[in-house]
Amino acid sequence: MSCFYLFLPGAGYHSTQKEDAYVKLCKSTCLKKDFQVVCRFSFIQIMTLGGRMGPQFVFKVSLGKTAYKKMSHLLKKGWGAVECVTEAVKLLEDAVLTNAGMGSNLNLSGSVECDASIMEGRKLMFGAVGAISGVKNPVEVSATLVNRQLGDKLSLGRLHPSVLVGDGAKQWAEENGIKTLETRHLITDDAQKTYQNHKRKLDIVNERDASKKMKLSEQEEEKIQDTVGAIVMDTSGNIATAVSSGGISLKQPGRLGPAATYGAGCWAYNQRPGKAGVGTSTSGSGEHIMKTLLARESALSIQREDNASLGLSNCFKNNFLESEFLEEEKDKLAGVLALKQNDGDTVEVLWGHTTDSMCVGYMSSSLKKPKVVMSRLPEGGIPGKSFTMSGVSI
């Protein structure tokens, strides 16, 4: 059976100011010698929320390509879907230009609190951490939570935890051999500058008791990025999904986002008799995604329909844009990346969004470079109110 990879490296606004840095990072990561491609298909997906795609898109395509190559190398060594999806998201967390792990947005107190989760489709185990500080790769903690649940139960019949938050999550990580560090080491200069700019504007608004929100400049908007994630199906047909996020800038300390919420950020379900295998990953407005459990609902909708595109379309219409849980929301912003495993070793890859644009790239071992598709709302479409989708069958 072939293996498949889907990536969600984040959402945001991008400028040309760091083009040289992006290019340099692309070259250095893509030239690593141990990243050998052994599988026939890879899919890389990048989304911006209503904005412009600049050189950062090129960086993220290359970063996704790096993750693809590394996972292929790991699968060749016998690693499974959970291990590979973890390593893929760790690469995204380590890239300071994404809003996950190192370089994450700062909360209202000027600190880093991250969310991350993993779900595997064989035993349907889920592991997540929320508002965790002092961990470079939160997705690694989520993976450990999943692996513990797949192992023996605790003494006295106790169950392993599936979700941990705050200081308790960090303590558990340390007890399970995951390296921690002082939170200040996760704060990059760019993240600190963005925080200071946003905090200054917020202070001005509060002091003036302004009735209207102040609009961020283009330079500041480029830092507002969302969840990164990945979907993997290994050669045994096991599906695993993962997401990781630093949350929105100036978020309330202790806030949990969709990346730490069951059914909101990611979903995985292996193929079973009468049911297709499916994996989903989401990005967008966190509160909208959590209220609608968008990852789970989109996966179930895709499974219910023989036509995967119809399933995803129905979910966006009935469970998101027209959801009773979002009746008071003016603009409903989200994107979904999905994989559907059908009979006969065929896979459908889908993406849909209510945002202005969603840029995707996909590649296979027969291609020397990724193919890139800029998905945009149709002419006359209104971000937050309209929907578009597309996909490929492999």
Image (cartoon, rainbow, N blue to C red):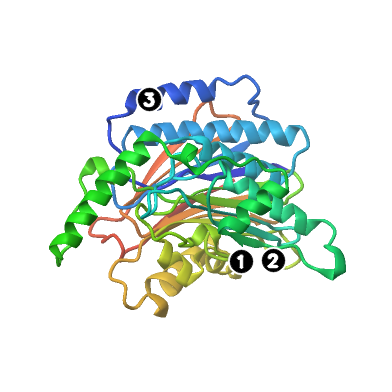
Crowd around label 2: few <14 · some 14–19 · many ≥20 (10 Å)? some
Q: Position of residue 324 (x, y in %)?
A: 40, 80
Position in image of residue 181 (x %, y %): 57, 40
> Contact (CB < 8 A) between labels 1 and 3?
no
Q: Which one is in front, 354 or 63?
A: 63
Image coords of residue 138 (percent x, y): 58, 48
Residue 278 appears anywhere in the view = no
Residue 223 % position (x, y)? 33, 43
CA separation, marks 3 and 2?
45 Å
Q: In the rendered image, which residue does mark 1 sit on?
A: 303
On residue 275, which mark appears?
2
Q: What's under tag 2, amino acid-wise?
A: Lys
Task: Examine the image and state in which quarter residue 57 appears.
Answer: top left
Disc 1 from disc 2: Cα separation: 7 Å
- Residue at (28% x, 70% y) in the render: 330
* Circle count: 3
Do labels 1 and 2 touch, CB within 8 Å? yes
SS at mark 3?
Answer: helix
